[in-house]
Amino acid sequence: MVRRIGLTGGIGSGKSTVAGLLAEHGAVVVDADAIAREVVAVGTPGLARVVEAFPGVLAPDGSLDRPALAGRVFADAAARELLESITHPLIAAESARRIDALPPDSVAVYDVPLLAESARGGEFDLVVVVQAPLDVRLARLTRRGLPPEQASERIASQASDSERRAIADLLIDNAGDLETLRAVVDAAWPRIAGVS
């Protein structure tokens, strides 16, 4: 039976880096953010529904104008909820399809930023939460080119650290450098894989 791992963490926590390290151990990573882009690709029903709900978010080439959409939803909780009501079921269905198609001895890591917000933690054999201090997360986001005000808005739009800790079976601290994180992930792998 596929071992299902929910991997989450706030924006800037290093969740994707942890996913990459788990893949090095043999986990199959199913990336909710990548699927979120696919379900609103040009020509999809998801894109049509988003454009219907949010007129003016279509780029000249027919793709989703992500910055325009982000500008409308990150500061407006009702708009964000509307967007999530369209995209989340599509993302969940595609993610489940991919996990269900894996060989039965697989360790599937579902890399999903909004796990605490969705109340879906019970679907997993283990929920792993990556955490880092707020100042570290803000610094990472600004290094990626996000203005400090937008970085703070995005962090504020997500679940709090305490809400994520409440659903965690395993916490991974990512306040340090990559080698420190690698050591933490290496030590956690037996539990994640279900062999300890």
Image (cartoon, rainbow, N blue to C red):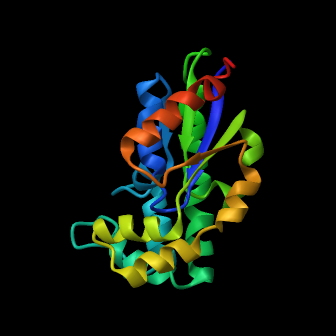
State left or right for residue 100 relative to residue 43: right
In percent of width and height, residue 129 lies at: 62, 49
Residue in view at x 51 percent, y 34 percent: 185
The C terminus: image quadrant: top right
State left or right for residue 65 relative to residue 159: left
In percent of width and height, residue 99 lies at: 57, 31
In percent of width and height, residue 67 lies at: 34, 75
Q: Residue extending furthest left?
A: 61
The N terminus: image quadrant: top right
Q: Is residue 148 above or below residue 7?
A: below
State left or right for residue 180 relative to residue 195: left
Residue in view at x 44 percent, y 65 percent: 136
Residue in view at x 56 percent, y 16 percent: 103
Q: Is residue 44 above or below residue 133?
A: above
Residue in view at x 45 percent, y 42 percent: 181
**Front-lying residue, 110 or 98:** 110
Query: How many numbered callouts?
Result: 0
In percent of width and height, residue 157 lies at: 57, 75
